[in-house]
Image (spheres, coloured by chain):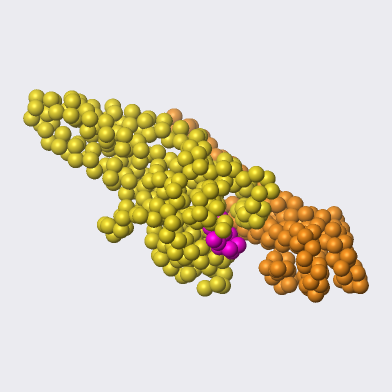
Amino acid sequence: MEILIPLIVIALIAVFVVGLYNRLVTLRQRVREAWSDIDVQLKRRWDLIPNLIETVKGYAAHERQTFDSVTQARAAAITAAQSGSPEQRAQAETALGAALVNLRAVAEAYPQLQAVQEFKDLSENLRDTEDKIAFARRFYNGNVRDYNTALQTVPTNILAGMFGFTAEQYFEMTDTAQREAPKVSFS
Amino acid sequence: MASPPSRLNIYDAVAANRWRTVALITVFTGIITALGYVVGEVFTPGGGLAVVPAALGLSGVSATASYFAGDKLVLAQSQARELAPGEESQLRNIVETLSIGLGIDPPRIYLIDDTAPNAFATGRDPKHASIAVTRGLLDKLDRTETEGVIAHELSHVVNRDIRVMLLVTVLVGTVALLSDWMLRSFAWGGGRRGRDRGGSGIILIVAIGLAILTPIIATLIQLAVSRQREYLADASGALLTRFPAGLASALRKIAADKEALEVANKATASLYFANPLKDAPRALDGLFDTHPPIAERIRRLEAM
């Protein structure tokens, strides 16, 4: 009988450790799933841009510089997504957001453009996508916070060290223009 | 007041509300067990424990049925129809966007053709959830107000309130059913036994008193659970949109609207965003209200 007691204690500890380990895996998995939400919306934004530029060009052809900077920012964002770090990607997407704010400001000066249905639809889509990016980012950062907190607090921090769990990065789009961008209205 | 609320305060509110809710549900299960026990004691002194599993079993069966089919029943009863793709794209965008913020699949969206502004969410979990809004809500509320209402309803979804509310509604029904049986059986069987044995006369009186009181208490608890959950959903909804003023403004508009929602009834009233019946008795200090006073909800939102 006496031999059973240490065995039971060991079994209980094992169950506890497995539970903690699984919690860390779950939290990390949530971070990765949340990332895909951001990814989908960022790609949706890239896809909207060429049509938006074409539509605006039809009414404001001489605003060449603005179009070029948006196109370049979009290309840079796509490159950063393929080969850059999350930080570089966040920077590139922030720059793209700022370029889009300029494009919108330019478009505001053309009343005929404002009346075009295609432009209205694209603007609404863009606004919707940027809202979704903002909410996806918030959800992602919340998950990163939960996961990183678990990495730093007792007792999960011990396991995190043993099994090589590393902290995830927040996805920050720090540019102030970008933060205000979703509230811009064309109407 | 329009400034974003600090995260900490809302998290505190969420935690406190959640704890109260757990306590209330525990009491509910206790009531059903006690009721079953007393029934057993009346008929066979010392046999109360044998009835407890039956009482729990009964509530279990009805709870399971409502778990799987309750949402469809509620939606059908409310004459809600599912939105076709492309219909009401602004509403759909709001639901999708806020769902992304909560990390859930967007629920199915239903429309109730009624001019009274209101909304509710139902289902068993975020993957089997539906959200229903009235035509009046879409017509009378602006975008930030609608966002506030949808965020409130999605909080019900993500907190699993929708499941709890369906289950609690059924548990109240079960309690009512049990006490009804009790009263009937006292009239036929229990009364005779009471005359045969002097001792069980007192138990019988206690039991009849319980049978009458319990459904009333159960209903009060249902209403209290419902009221607590509205505060909780207001708090989580404000956390999601970071804009409590939008929700507060929606509440003000709905409070000013005197129209009753015709498809709502006493059973479904507690599911709605705001009390749809508009004729709630104000007696007993609001004890029988399905929803907290709107003024108090607005006050709490503005304090965030």
Task: In this rendered view, identify the residue nearer to me: A82 or B249.
Answer: B249
Tell me what residue is drawn at x 38 percent, y 46 percent: B266
Task: In this rendered view, identify the residue nearer to me: A164 or B260.
Answer: B260
Q: Position of residue B240 (x, y in %)?
A: 57, 60
Tell me what residue is drawn at x 58 percent, y 63 percent: B142
Chain coloured orange here: A
In this rendering, position of residue B115 left or right of residue B97: left
Q: Position of residue A41 (x, y in %)?
A: 74, 55
Q: Quadrant of residue B97?
A: bottom right
Q: Is residue B143 on the magenta stretch?
A: yes
Question: Is residue A6 among the parts visible in the rendering?
Answer: no
Q: Quadrant of residue A88?
A: bottom right
In this rendering, position of residue A42 left or right of residue B216: right
Task: In this rendered view, identify the residue nearer to me: B20 or B180.
Answer: B180
Q: Position of residue A127 (x, y in %)?
A: 72, 62
Tell me what residue is drawn at x 45 percent, y 61 percent: B257
Task: Tell me where the magenta segment starts and ends, as one range.
Answer: B140-151
Q: Position of residue A142 (x, y in %)?
A: 62, 58
- Would you place residue B16 above or below residue B182 in this image? below
> In which quadrant of the rendered image does the C terminus of chain A lie?
bottom right
Tell me what residue is drawn at x 57 percent, y 69 percent: B4
Q: Is residue A50 on the magenta stretch?
A: no
Question: Is residue A184 among the parts visible in the rendering?
Answer: yes
Q: Which shade is chain B?
A: yellow
State the residue lying farthest toward the bottom. A109
Task: In this rendered view, identify the residue nearer to me: B25 or B100.
Answer: B100
Magenta: main secondary structure: helix
